Image: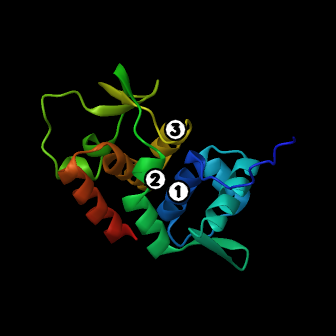
Amino acid sequence: MARKPNRQLVLKPQDLYLLLALVACGDQEMTYPELADFTGLSMSEVHAALRRAEAARLLFFEQRRPRILKPAFTEFLFHGARYAFPPVRGTLVAGVPTAHAAPPLNEHVAPSADPPPVWPAIEGSVRGVALVPLYPSAPQAALRSPALYENLALFDAIRAGNARERALAQRLFEERL
C-alpha cells in the first residue's frame, strides 16, 4: 500500500531568523536580493521562508512587500519559538557573545563568574560556552547589523536564559515592536 506524502508545512529556523531580520530593518523597504544579502540566505531560501511564515500567519504581503503580523509574531516568539527551536549548547569556544552577554541585555544583567554564551565564530573575541546560532549565517550578519545582532541575542535569551533574563528580553522586544 502506497503511503501518502505529508504536506504539512513546518517552520524552519531560517524562517524565524528572517522574521527577526525584518524586525531589525524596521520600515525600510527591502527587495528579496537585499534581504538575501542582509541575512546571508540564498534568494530561494528567502522566498521559501517568507512563504512558510505567511502560511503560519506570522506575516502578510502588502503590495508585494512582507509585513509582520505583530500580535501573532510576538505570541510565537514569546511562547512557542523556544520550544520549536530549543537551545543547543556546546563546549568552551571563541565566539560572538549572545543572550545576556550581548547588547542590550548586558547593560541590565550583571556579569557572572560563569563563561558567557557565545556563537562559535572565527571573528569572535570572547571565550565562552557555545550556543548554536538560530541559523549558520546569523553571527556574520549580526556583526554587520547592530539591530539584527540585538534581536538575535534577545531571542537567545528567550530560548536559553533563566526566567529573569527571558522576562527582560521579552520586555525589550515589546519596546522594539
Mark 3 Cα-neighbour bin, 10 Å: few <14, some 14–19, many ≥20: some
Instruction: Give the quarter of the figure containing the C terminus.
Output: bottom left
131 to the left or right of 140? left
x%, y% of residue 7? 75, 54
Q: Could you tell me the amino acid type at mark 3?
A: Gln
CB-based contact (under 8 Å), mark 1 and mark 2: yes
138 to the left or right of 100? right
Instruction: Give the quarter of the figure containing the N terminus.
Output: top right
Give the secondary structure at mark 1: helix
Distance CA(mark 3)–CA(mark 1): 13 Å
Residue sticking out furthest to the right: 1
Residue under numbered circle 2? 148
- The residue drawn where x is 68% and y is 72% is 65
| Numbered tag placed on residue 21 in the rendering | 1
Looking at the picture, does residue 114 appear above or below residue 42?
above
| Disc on the earlier residue, 1 or 2 | 1
